[in-house]
Image: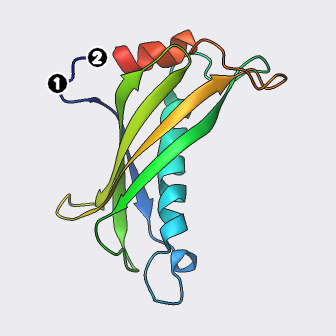
Amino acid sequence: MNDTAEPKLLARVPIRVRWRDLDAYNHVNNATFLTYLEEARLVWLAGIEGEWKTDAFSPVLAASQVNFREQIEWPGELVVEVRCERIGNSSLTLSHRIMSADGERLYSDASVVMVWVDPASGRPVPLPAAVRAACVG
């Protein structure tokens, strides 16, 4: 992928902050940010044409890095963006941004590495063609 070009936007997923997402400090718990990222990734994956998960291959989260920029409070309407940063032989690096629904506030930016593996062996397998096409096309 071209490092100077804007990474491809794969999904913009709306998320409503739930009361149960709050912690004792009355803001969204840090761990819940990861749940929001996961939800956005799965919405994207479920919407691609073709197979992204079968008995022969499945994605696992290999790494995650999250920057917490601002607290999220309830009630709230969010949007999570998912972008393709890098395509490897068996992996993807995806960037995420958690923002207010109006785009005025950036709550978090994050990056994850997903690796496709053979569930039986746990060994990496080639990135599914449908996933590669969704990131490139």
| Residue name at image x 54 percent, y 66 percent | 31
Q: Is residue 50 left or right of residue 70?
A: right
Residue type for callout 2 = Met
Task: Looking at this view, name the residue that lies furthest to the right.
Answer: 120
Q: Position of residue 133 (x, y in %)?
A: 43, 13
Pointer 2 local density, CA inside 10 Å: few below 14, some 14–19, many at least 20: few
Tell me: residue 83, above or below residue 104: above
Tell me: residue 72, above or below residue 95: below
Picture mark count: 2
Disc assigned to residue 5: 1
Q: Could you tell me if the residues under marks 2 and 1 are in contact, i.e. CB atoms within 8 Å? A: yes
Q: Is residue 75 left or right of residue 53?
A: left
Q: Secondary structure at mark 1?
A: loop
Which quadrant of the rendered structure holds the N terminus?
top left
CA gap between label 2 and label 1 equals 8 Å
Q: Which residue is mark 2?
A: 1
Residue type for callout 1 = Ala
| Residue name at image x 77 percent, y 26 percent | 122
Q: Secondary structure at mark 2?
A: loop
